[in-house]
Each structure stands twice: as structure tokens, then as C-alpha cells.
Image: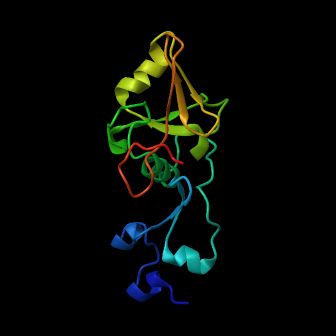
Amino acid sequence: MLDVGALIGVSDLDRTALAHRPHVAIVDKLRGGLVALTDAAGIRRGAALGPPPETDGYTPGAVLDRFVRLRDRRCRFPGCRRRARTCDLDHRLEWPEGPTAHHNLCCLCEHHHRLKHQAPGWRFDEADDGGLAVTMPNGEVLVSHPPRFGTDLDLPPY
């Protein structure tokens, strides 16, 4: 197997155009959710396919950040369409009680992130089916899911 870095005469691909080589999205066929991101080299190496590992600190690493933003693609508050690239990554279960991992992170725009932490009576929990359950002060619960990968539709993931 050829080493791309050796072919072009560099030892580190991080600061070259090849650092952002095309990724392959592995998608759950039934739900349409993002399961893993890899590339052709990772598949040839036999790298494990799955979400990136959790990190020890509060801030997710670049790989985990990219995965969560690509999975959510927009603010997870029900009905909000703010793009993920402008959102904050928020821990559903506050850190350090909850890990900095794909299953505990979601994208929330600045407005809804402040709502979660500063407005009384609002609760953000994980729904039984993995969605984000938002409980309003009146007790009504709204559930949101990321859009199916490859679409921009707000359809349930079933």
C-alpha cells in the first residue's frame, strides 16, 4: 500500500489539502442517521467504523466536533433551522457528569443554548428513541431528531 505523504514528499498531511480529503459517510439505512465518517484510506486500513471516541475534557476534539455538526446539521431545538456551523455544541447532561461524547452533544444556536441554561422551567433530555426531548414550562414535551442524512427534510427518522 502506498503512503500518500511519501509520494508528495511530506511527513504530515495536517497542513495540506489532503487533510480534508473526501470522507465517506456511513448512514443507518432505517433511520437515516450518521453512524460514522471515514475515508478510503481508513477503510483499506480496516479502521473501526463508528462514531469518534469521547474526549476527557470539556471541549470536543476536531473529529468529534465535525461528526456532531454533520450529524445534526442544524440547531436541535424543535423547529429551529439555524445551521450547525453557527451553533454551539452543548452537553445534554452537563459536563463533568456527562461525557464529551457524540451521544451527549448536540448543536444549539446561541438563543436556544441560553434558553436551556438561563430560562426557568425548560428541560432538555434525551428521548427514548435518541432524539432531543425539550420540556417547556407548561409541561408540553417536543422531540427533535437530526434530519435524515442526505436530505434537509424534517421527517421523523423512521
- Residue 101 seen in the current view: no
Estimate the x, y position of residue 70 in percent, counting from the top left. 43, 52
Residue 31 vs residue 84, the one in the foreground: 31
Q: Residue at x 54, y 28 (%)?
A: 133
Estimate the x, y position of residue 58 in percent, counting from the top left. 56, 37
Q: Residue at x 43, y 72 (%)?
A: 13
Estimate the x, y position of residue 119 in percent, counting from the top left. 45, 12
Q: Is residue 145 above or below residue 2?
A: above
Residue 69 vs residue 61, the one in the foreground: 69
Q: Residue at x 37, y 43 (%)?
A: 84
Residue 42 is left or right of residue 83, and the answer is: right
Name the colouring of the figure. Answer: rainbow
Residue 151 vs residue 9, the one in the foreground: 151
In the picture, the quarter occupied by the N terminus is bottom right
Estimate the x, y position of residue 134 in percent, counting from the top left. 51, 24
Q: Is residue 138 above or below residue 21?
A: above
